[in-house]
Amino acid sequence: MREIRNVTRGTVLATGARWADTFLTRLKGLLLRLELEPGEALVLTPCNSVHMFGMLFSLDVVFCDAAKRVVRVVRRLRPFLATLPVSGAVYALEMAPGAVDASRTEPGDQLEF
């Protein structure tokens, strides 16, 4: 597990990030989970959109480019919704609702993970 830091703001988005970087781990994602604890995150790569089909809880999602710069932030994405593809996104960070606001993360911020 890894930490995800917002270098621009000097804040932490997650203290326990797991990676989903194969077809099967991305396909499974967070299915069958009942929630994400504060500090948990799933980093999907490569990924430029996410869906919430079959999910039971909302998520904050941060999309980053290859340089780990934030290109889009989605707060409280609800179950059974999806995002449109995000141009330039290579990473999607799925976190518990409120993680984005707590870290004050906005497009243009530089992340480190």
Image: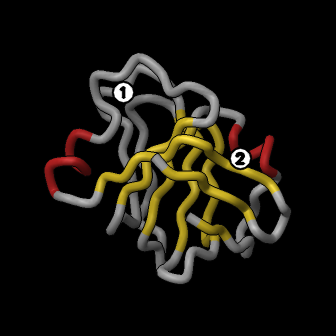
Which residue is found at the position 16% from the left and 57% from the top?
A: 23
Relative to residue 70, is residue 76 depicted above or below? above
Q: Is residue 70 above or below residue 98?
A: below
Where on the picture, by quarter, is residue 98? top right
Mark 2 and mark 1 lie on one chain; the one further toward the N terminus is 1
Q: Which of the colour schemes (rainbow, by chain, secondary structure, one colour) is used?
A: secondary structure
Counting the numbered discs, the total is 2
CA neighbours of label 2 inside 10 A, class few (<14), some (14 to 19), many (20+): many
Q: Residue at x 53, y 41 (%)?
A: 16
Q: Assign a secondary structure to mark 2.
A: helix
25 vs 20, left or right, is left
Which residue sits at x=37%, y=56%?
A: 44
At label 2, which amino acid type do we have?
Val
User: Is the residue 67 above or below the residue 1 in the image?
Assistant: below
Q: Secondary structure at mark 1?
A: loop
Q: Nearer the viewer, residue 52 or 100?
A: 100
Q: In the image, 57: left or right of 44?
A: right
In the foreground, 113 or 47: 113
| Marks 2 and 1, how far apart at CA | 19 Å
From the top left corner, tell me how far across and down residue 13 is, in percent: 67, 49
Q: Position of residue 70 (x, y in %)?
A: 63, 70
Is 95 or 72 nearer to us in this picture? Answer: 95
Q: Position of residue 83 (x, y in %)?
A: 45, 53
Q: Residue furthest front?
A: 1
Q: Which residue is mark 1?
A: 55
Q: Which residue has dot 2 on it?
A: 100
Relative placement, left or right, of 85 versus 77 is left
Q: Residues within 10 Å of mark 1 (few under 14, many from 20)?
A: some
Q: Given the image, on which type of amino acid does mark 1 rest?
A: Met
Of marks 2 and 1, the one in the foreground: 2
x and y, in percent, of residue 76 in the image: 61, 36
